[in-house]
Image: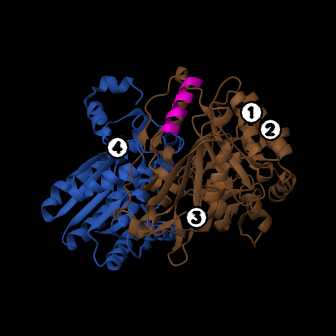
Amino acid sequence: MPVVPGRERCSEDLEAATRDAHLTRGLGRAYGDAALPAPGDLRVACSRLADRILAFDSTTGILTAEAGLSLDALYKTFLPRGFFTPVTPGTRYVTLGGMVAADVHGKNHHRDGCFGRHVLSLTMRVGDGRIVTCSPVEHADLFHATVGGMGLTGHLLEVTFRLTQVPSPWIYQETARVANIDQFIESLKSAAADWPMTMGWIDCVSRGKAMGRGVLYRGRWAERDEAPPAFPALHDPIPVPLMMPNVLLGRLTVRAFNELYYWFPWKARAVVHPRSFFYPLDVAGDWHRLYGSRGFIQYQCVLPASGGHQAARRFLDVVTKGGGASFLCVIKDCGPEGNGMLSFPRPGISIALDLAMRGDTQQLVDRMNEQVIAEGGRIYLAKDALTRREHFRAMEPRLDAFLEVRRRWDPGGLIRSAQSVRLFGW
Amino acid sequence: MKVAFLGATKGMGRALARLMVQRGDRLHLLGRDADELARCARDLEARAASPTHVAHSICDLERPETFGPALTAADEALGGFDTVIVTAGIFATQDRLENDRELTRRLLVIDFANTVVFCEYARAHLLTNGGGTLCVFSSVAGERGRKPVVLYGSAKAGLTRYLEGLDHKFRANGLRTICVKPGFVKTSMTEGLSAPPFAGEPEAVARAVLEAIDKGTPVVYVPGIWALVMLVIRQLPRSIMRRVGF
């Protein structure tokens, strides 16, 4: 794992903390190096304490808050009142600033797009120190480069977006076992028409006929008459007290886990807690410890729909051959591309993996990236730790346009991260 | 409860104020920066369980002439408050204070002299209103003379003694005084210091303090483990305190 010297400037006064800063981080949970400063950049702001809600209109659902407000706080404050974020990633431990910067997507991407689609305006401190408000019509170039721009266009100070009204705080969920990757892609496609939220877990170890077998989840907010009367209880995460011994992270453990997960008697239909539906991993605090002392990386790519089922099969072939044993492999069909210049999703199939860090992980990532380039797909920067500069350029025809806007708003090149230096050179 | 709150804009005060509006308490914010107060008031209004108006008045611990008018304004806005909370104060490391006489003077005035004067105004208001609760944040730094907090600790020691005396004298008249002694809590005040074991989070501290306010507990250590830590430190002989670094 990369270790970076320096100390965060953490203050309620984000305007002051971001003055001269090279980077602002939120909860610092990005899987890769997106929230880490570039070598030598000691001035790093942290938005965690800037978490005030500045306005909320319960008739329109429009909310303005400081960028450090976490999704966890938003959930606890607004779900009891019947409002929820229009788009949620797979964790509640993310700030609004992080959600904009990564232009996060969720189980409803095929219907509701990324978070950026629901953002009305942003207030930020740009590279020359000015504080600027941007929106799809005001400084639109800055807005579209900031949505999905990994915090590289400026320091996010305030975010205005629209919450969604939900009929109840519970989720109606259906679960089905799916025999292989081809059936999986078909099931996602057919579920997309009727269900606002879909995703699947796939077994990334099995090969041959069973390749890509897994469990498909379909969900929607439960109607008031089918939901329990009580509000789903709020529990704090259960801590993971110990590091998993590295010896338990071998192929056999992963195979056993995948076997159990596949054959577990999942309930076909149930009204479930929104936390277990949206944030299954948040149940365990410090769940990264399950990957032992060497840690893990995440990898997520999207393969264009034009490649058909075979594209996913070819990609899984690279993963399984490369020994990329993953406990959790998540598959999701993406809807149309969003408005962010570097936003990740595009129509096709997205596959996300956790990979325990090993000596050959870099080579595996290189092989996967070469496959993604061959398919015309791309990777998700919020999760990337190891992609090479030339590989990223090959998968991102939009990169130059993004860098041009970034240069326009930060001609001095003040704002950067370890990731931007690794992938773009500055 | 109807609460006049000095210091709700940051750290533990912010967390406590949020907890209070969420359960329906009415707040009036006191502080030195009108813009900050207004933003915090909007945040509290948005988080409140039911629609509520949070007003605010200027009150600066460096300007004692603001104390009386601020508390009168809070009293009028709330229709007579029954609780006053003080979380405001400043902190500086021993190193900085040893090299800056003016900062030392300011810290002693803000954290001790003027906080006591503010509490005297608050006490008078509360007794006039028929009693209530005065909850003030002191610190574990005031428990012993210790190397890293010689100056800050001396101000907090004075404040702790004052609050103790106040509780003894006026509890029978219906005024409950609560002295909160935080150990190390991760807030912007302790930003840049390396956190020791048992460092607390503001939200957990706020829950413990609110419970103490409800029960009228005169002294509360937060996080709770610090009661034990300080129990040990209070017993250490001077010969040992002189040798150790904490």
Colour mapping: by chain
Does label 3 or label 1 sit earlier along the sequence?
A: 3
- Kind of residue indicated by mark 2: Gln
What residue span does the magenta drawing correspond to? A250-263
Q: Identify the disc placed on residue A92.
A: none
The Cα–Cα distance between marks 2 and 3, rounded to whole angstroms, is 33 Å
Label 3 sits on what residue type?
Pro
The x, y position of residue A182, in whole percent, is 68, 45
Mark 2 or mark 3: name the one nearer the start of the chain: 3
Task: Identify the chain drawn in brown.
Answer: A
* Up/down of B132 relative to A362, above or below: below
Give the chain letter for blue: B
Main secondary structure along the magenta-highlighted residues = helix
Q: Which of the two residues, B3 or A400, is positioned nearer the viewer here?
A: A400
Q: Is residue B122 magenta?
A: no
Q: Are marks 2 and 4 in contact (CB under 8 Å)?
A: no
Residue placed under numbered mark 3 in the picture? A86
